[in-house]
Amino acid sequence: MAKISRRSLLKLALGGAAALPFARFGGSRASAADPGAPRRLILWPSLNGAAPEYFWPSAAGATSLITQPLAAYASKMTFLKGVNIEGSYNHFAVRSMFTGAAIPDYLSPDPTVKSVDQVVADAFETAAPSAMRSLHLGAIPADSIEFYQLYGRSTFFFNPTPVHYEANPVTAFDTIFGGLGQSGGEAPVDHRGDIVSITRAELDELEARVAASPREARKLADHTTALDAVAGGDAPVPGTCDATTMQSVEKLRARLQGNARAAYDYSLFSDIFDAQIDVIARAVTCGLTRVATLQAGSADGNVIVPVDGGYPHHNTSHGDAMTFARVQQWYAGKLARLLQQLDVPDPLDTSGRTVLDNSCVVWLSECQPQSHGSESVPAFFVGGAAGALKTGQLLDLGGASNKALLKTLCSAMGVSDAASAHFGNDVISEVLL
Amino acid sequence: VKRLALMAALFSSACVGQILGDGAGDDDGGGPDDGPRNLCDGAEADVAGPRLLRRLTSPELTASIRYAFGLSAAEWAGPAVPADPASADGFTNNVDRLVVDESYARGLYATATGVADAVVSAAVLPRVLPCSGAGGADCARTFLDTAGRRLYRRPLTDAEIARYLELHDRVAPAEGFA
């Protein structure tokens, strides 16, 4: 893929719980976060859960077998026992976990609300826009590119239609960073407004022709909304972002450049995962974007996880709990790679906090590996969201809804109650400062 | 100007796709429906299908651009749009799923920019538009009658032509033709 210009970067698409004690889940409240700090949200879905005995630590500040690779960050983590995925269970709960929407079975339609990443991205866009509204990457986010089209993109993130994940790290890097640092020549004039204006005029003409069809009229309405987003333009790329090549990406270039299908080669899973982590880390750290998600594997997928001789992810979750715990430990090792890169002074914050301190990185599962129940799913977050969230805790929330967790994240990120209304009113007050 | 008109034309026509049917049918405005629209069970009179907006699939978009401008793979690598979503049975050409959301619109805008860069290159533009060396309003109209017709799969309407020529007339004095 040819490198794109700096201007092209700016055009990037980046396209039943139990009742809860009042003491624990009050209404939303003002956040204690530093309002001027550049907060970030990163969502890390952990698929198929984990056996409790291998996931939960014995005490606050400790780690478990699965989370042992994260030991260096234990003081910045809060474990959340007792979070239930409300209105759903089994693997199809992936569509509920970050949206709060009820998905009672596989055949249920997709949520019609935005997932928390998109809600937060909206708020950031209004308050302090980033060059890239949000970034969504995948590491083999489906068993094949055909499965990605069929299932993968309706897995986690909605706006409210499924959000696209870029599964090819070479494409991701080139699209995001390829044009940075290029200079010379006169800066071109931005004709986005003219182009959007012409397109809007054509949509207006079409609207009259399909007025009798609600279905088609809705397509046009969605199209117009999307056009509005393009018309809005993007914020400048921060000077802290650079286009230095990444070893992890260059390692894959010969195999993946211009080859979307090759990004679903199981033998490359670990390398793709590393490269996507590195791309996200740089984009988030330099402030190019402040909302990112990374889906590694898929809920019903059998990408081979390179532990021992290799285990198929989903099938292994149905087998020996210790073996699957070691598989999940491998993913925790990948998360450590991300945290290490975020644990650096924040170039956008003069207070001396690290990017990780200003972030909230959320690990959340859709269900348990054997029972497929979605009660007390594995959950923790890392980072205090610029002082909004209390870390270093091991909490037992006794049946909190994932909607309370989503509402809490919104509160920590400065999202208004109105904008996060579909997550309800409860928050996890123990973690809000 | 040529680059600008090209971007606008590409962004517009590729977004919009085609309208099919005569509009006589109806629908409920609900979500994607993967089932047939007319069951043809013999118990009811034939009903004309509803008028449909149909966005091009990614392969169709790619083929359309290559045909419209004669671009080789070396000259243009391909669109930067997300993969087309599939229906429950795996087909990726379901009209109700081929929508333009924000991610797709941004990708399409980036695609339009990339195609414009390719077409106005010194190696391609004289081939696509031999009059480009001279430029001017007549040449701009020629472009709309040739490349525009291929992109829209029909002659442009007077209103469409007027919009593009207005853009040309407004921008050309400052930016030149190509």
Image (spheres, rainbow, N blue to C red):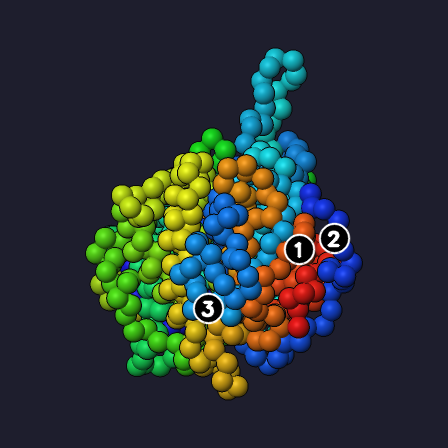
SS state under label 1: strand
Residue ranking furthest to the bottom: A350
Residue A104 in view in this figure: yes
Please name the residue shown 66% across and 34% down the image. B27
Q: Looking at numbered disc 3 in the image, what kind of residue is underneath it?
A: Tyr
Q: Residue A20's mark?
A: 2
Please name the residue shown 33% across and 64% down the image. A174
Judging by the rendered image, the residue that carries numbered circle 1 is: A397
Subunit under mark 3: A
Q: Looking at numbered disc 2 in the image, what kind of residue is underneath it?
A: Leu
Please name the residue shown 61% across and 20% down the image. B46
- Graded by Cα atoms within 10 Å as few (under 14), some (14 to 19) or many (20 or more), the crowding at tag 3 reads many
Residue A368 location, x and y as percent?
A: 53, 42
Relative to A188, say whether A114 is above or below. above
Q: Residue A73's mark?
A: 3
Subunit under mark 2: A
Classify the position of the C terminus of chain B by image quarter.
Answer: bottom left
Subunit under mark 1: A
Q: Is residue B167 left or right of residue B147?
A: right
Residue ranking furthest to the front: A58
Q: Are marks 2 and 3 on the same chain?
A: yes
Q: Are marks 1 and 2 on the same chain?
A: yes
Q: Quadrant of residue A68?
A: bottom left
Cα–Cα gap, marks 2 and 3: 29 Å
Q: Are marks 2 and 3 in contact (CB under 8 Å)?
A: no
Residue ranking furthest to the top: B42
Sequence-wise first label, 2 or 3: 2
Relative to B54, say whether A279 is above or below. below
Q: Are marks 1 and 2 in contact (CB under 8 Å)?
A: yes
Cα–Cα gap, marks 1 and 2: 8 Å
Of residue A145 and residue B42, the one placed in the foreground of this image is: A145
